[in-house]
Image: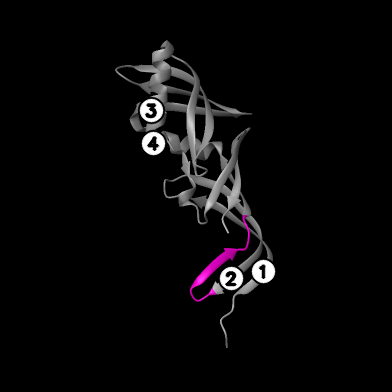
C-alpha cells in the first residue's frame, strides 16, 4: 500500500494555555488554513498556502514575565492595557527606590519578534526615560515566534483591555 498524504479541505486548531520556553503563557493560539496535507511517516503537516494565526496573551501573563525578567530591580509592577498602549507603574531600584510610571508601545520586528518601547515616562525627566528604555532593551524581545509550535509571521499586534492579540500568517 502506498503512503500517500491525507488531504484535509480546511483546518482550525486551537492550542489553549501554550507555555513558551521563556515562560510566557499564551491563553490561546489559533491556526486556520485550507488544503492541509498530513504525512504519517515521518509525521508532517503542510499547508498548500499560508494560513491565519492568532495568539491572545493575558495582561497577567505579560506582567508575570516582565517581573521575572526584571528581578530585584522592579517591584510592585502594575500594568494597564489600554487601546494602543500599556501603562506601567512600578518601583525601580537604583541607588535608591523610585516610583515610575511609563507609557509603553509595542512593535513587531522582522515579522517574528514583539518589542516593547517607551513612549513616555514620569520619573527623573529624560534621564529616567533612557533608564527605563535601557531596562526594556535588556528584556526585549517580549515574544519571539520561533518558540511557537508552527512557523508564524506576525502582521499586527492589538492592545486591548486586559490582553494582547497578535495576528499573522502560518507558513505553508
Of the residues under marks 3 and 1, which one precedes in the sequence? 1
Q: Are marks 2 and 1 in contact (CB under 8 Å)?
A: yes
> Which residue does the numbered mark 3 point to in the structure image?
135
The number of numbered badges drawn on the structure is 4
Q: Residues within 10 Å of mark 1 (few under 14, many from 20)?
A: few
Q: Percent position (x, y) of residue 6?
A: 62, 74
The mark closer to the camera, 4 or 2, is: 2
The C terminus sits in image quarter: bottom right
Tell me the tag on residue 69.
Answer: 4
Furthest-right residue in this view: 9
Q: Is residue 78 left or right of residue 155?
A: left
Name which residue lies at 35% across and 27% down: 73
Give the label on residue 8, or none. Answer: 1
Instruction: Using the image, tell me which numbered label, if any, was put on residue 54.
Output: none
Q: Nearer the viewer, mark 2 or mark 3?
A: 2
Residue 38 - label: 2
Q: Secondary structure at mark 1?
A: strand
Q: CA distance from mark 2 to mark 1?
A: 8 Å
Q: Of the residues under marks 2 and 1, which one precedes in the sequence? A: 1
Which mark is first along the chain, 2 or 4?
2
- N-term-proximal mark, 4 vs 1: 1
For the residues labelled 4 and 2, the Cα–Cα distance comes to 39 Å
- Mark 3–mark 1 Cα distance, whole angstroms, equals 47 Å
Amino acid at each position: 500500500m502506498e503512503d500517500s498524504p491525507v488531504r484535509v479541505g480546511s483546518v482550525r486548531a486551537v492550542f489553549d494555555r501554550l507555555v513558551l520556553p521563556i515562560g510566557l503563557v499564551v491563553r490561546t493560539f489559533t491556526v486556520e488554513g485550507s488544503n492541509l496535507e498530513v504525512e504519517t511517516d515521518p509525521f508532517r503537516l503542510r499547508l498548500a498556502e499560508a494560513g491565519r494565526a492568532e495568539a491572545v496573551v493575558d495582561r497577567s501573563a505579560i506582567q508575570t514575565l516582565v517581573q521575572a525578567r526584571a528581578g530585584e530591580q522592579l517591584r510592585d509592577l502594575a500594568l494597564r492595557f489600554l487601546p494602543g498602549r500599556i501603562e506601567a507603574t512600578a518601583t525601580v531600584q537604583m541607588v535608591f527606590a523610585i516610583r515610575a510610571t511609563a507609557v509603553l508601545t509595542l512593535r513587531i520586528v522582522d515579522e517574528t519578534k514583539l518589542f516593547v518601547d517607551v513612549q513616555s515616562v514620569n520619573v527623573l525627566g529624560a534621564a529616567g526615560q533612557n533608564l527605563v528604555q535601557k531596562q526594556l532593551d535588556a528584556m526585549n524581545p517580549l515574544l519571539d515566534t520561533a518558540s511557537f509550535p508552527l512557523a508564524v509571521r506576525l502582521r499586527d499586534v492589538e492592545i486591548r483591555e486586559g490582553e494582547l492579540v497578535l495576528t499573522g500568517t502560518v507558513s505553508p
